[in-house]
Image (cartoon, grey):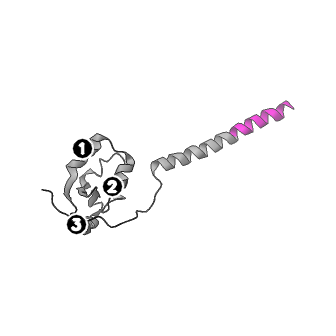
Amino acid sequence: MSKVITSEEVIKHNSNDSVWMVIRNDVYDVTSFLEEHPGGEETLLEVAGQDATQAFDDVGHSEDAKELLKKYKIGSLPPGETMPNVVPQQKPNCCEKVKQIVMVSSVVAGAILVAIVLRKYLASN
């Protein structure tokens, strides 16, 4: 039988020293996994002490990652209890940053191309 851990207890574990999170009403202590996490420790710290189900699902973790997660399970929320709605601070994720870089690079490349074409056109006249 799984240990029952209240949402109030989970909320207390939201620092670099103790990182607990809830995924599908199961409680995980991922403190020892911070340095190993492929997405960086910041990714885990953003959802520390919170329900991380949506964040976990949004990333599309592999079956290996889902299997590894089992190692960190320390209990479950009481039946019928859910984590309070906590809206984490929105930060651009890596994909959004890449999109911004690609967009700026495209604009710069387009401007250079226009300058080259314009220069050749003016030189021929």
Identity of the residue drawn at 73% across and 39% down: 114
**Front-most of 100 and 28?**
28
x and y percent of residue 24 in the render?
28, 55
What is the three-letter code of the residue carrying label 2?
A: Thr
What span is in magenta?
112-125
**Front-most of 52 and 25?**
25
Residue 116 quadrant? top right
Identity of the residue drawn at 29% across and 41% down: 63
Question: Element at badge 2?
Answer: helix
Give the CA separation, mark 2 to mark 3: 16 Å
* Mark 2 touches mark 3? (CB < 8 Å): no
Residue 76 quadrant? bottom left
What is the three-letter code of the residue carrying label 3?
A: Thr
Dominant secondary-structure state across the stretch colored magenta: helix
Question: In this rendering, would 72 be left or right of 45?
Answer: left
Q: Is residue 44 above or below residue 83?
A: above
Identity of the residue drawn at 32% across and 41% down: 62
x and y percent of residue 66 in the render?
27, 45
According to the picture, the residue beneath numbered tag 3 turns out to be 6
According to the picture, the residue beneath numbered tag 2 turns out to be 53
Question: In this rendering, would 109 be left or right of 51?
Answer: right
x and y percent of residue 34 in the render?
29, 52
Q: Is residue 9 above or below residue 106?
A: below
Identity of the residue drawn at 26% across and 50% down: 33
According to the picture, the residue beneath numbered tag 1 turns out to be 67
